[in-house]
Amino acid sequence: MYEVVKDIGEERVTELLHRLRKGKIAVIGDVALDMYWRADMRKSELSRETPHFPLPIVEEWMSPGAAGNVATNIAALKPEKLFLLSIIGKDWRGDLFIKEVEKRGIITDFLIRSDERVTNAYCKPLRRGFSDVEYEDPRIDFENFRLITQKEEDELIKLLEKVAKEIDVLCVVDQMRFGCITPRVREKIENFSREGLTVIVDSRERIGYFTDVILKPNDIEMFKAMGIEKDPQKLSIEELLEFAEKFSIQKRSDVCVTLGARGAIYVEKDTSKKYYVPTVNLTPPLDVCGAGDTFLSIFSLVLGTGGKKVEAVFMGNLAASVVVKKIGTTGVATVEEIMDNYKKHWATS
């Protein structure tokens, strides 16, 4: 059996949003610099040196990506304390990342600058011609291809131990193949959770490596971690909850699984309670880029400020349904936007 939670009420939504300002949260994980270059191909002229038409860049903008985007989403909710812990390079991309993070009001004191690392970056050329159709060329990626050093690992753990004393919730973003969430760092994170700190983990490839935390995979990531070769979109909510319960038992962890347009499910490890929290149907166009980061951000902050687990899931859906309507950008959801969205789609349904 499971409980379906379609709404928690306007009064409770208002109260939870108000509490967010008391939040004390840290984000630890892999950051990146997202760079966008918009090219107007109507301005392109055949090169005299090569048989190519260059990309005439008419607009450029940047934003923090990966764990940086999670921190950006949290910053938009204006918590009392927000720390970002990661390792970046002493390169021009690192300089730009620092600038973009500070622009959003995020403290950079806990970012480690390394001579031996490059700052991860995703550079995205966007082409447009005579029509309004725009498409993205193959990305230009800057990424590390070696593990962090023991010195860098020791410094990151030391910073985490310092920050853990000042927060109520820790949000972990484990994204890169050679990122900063090493086995030693992961063990330290799990120990903090066992000692009572609320820890939420989002990991693209290694969600199955964590135990004794709150796991937040999407359905595909959970199936991959469990070695299940099925299409989760073709399964019922009941079937997905059964798999989530098995995953929860295996990892001794609460499990929150996001299901895209279907919403999310949650399994509590201690009580075996299971919840399905649907989201509203939205009309296209929709852009799901960054919606998972938005969900993770408010989900973590609600838990860190005393909200119930199922309420955190509901608020995650509510915030994510704001950003999917922001086309062509990895957006954030402000408190005002979240409240307006609730009144528009939930309070009237």
Image (spheres, rainbow, N blue to C red):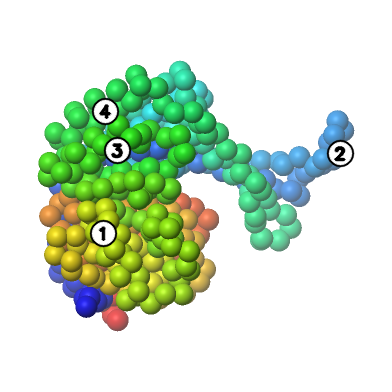
Question: Where does the image place residue 57, in percent across and percent down from the top left?
Answer: 66, 41
Mark 3–mark 1 Cα distance, whole angstroms, equals 18 Å
User: What residue is disc 2 on?
Assistant: 51
**Please, is residue 68 above or below residue 158 in the view?**
below
| Residue at image location 29% in from the left, 81% down from the top | 349
| Residue at image location 80% in from the left, 42% down from the top | 53
User: What residue is disc 1 on?
Assistant: 248
Q: Earlier in the sequence, mark 1 or mark 4?
A: 4
Residue 259 occupies quadrant:
bottom left
Q: Is residue 179 left or right of residue 60?
A: left
Q: Is residue 167 left or right of residue 66?
A: left
User: What residue is disc 4 on?
Assistant: 157
In front of the other: label 4 or label 3?
Answer: 3
In front of the other: label 1 or label 4?
Answer: 1
User: What residue is disc 3 on?
Assistant: 186
> Label 2 is placed on what type of residue?
Pro
> Label 1 is placed on what type of residue?
Ser
| Residue at image location 50% in from the left, 23% down from the top | 91
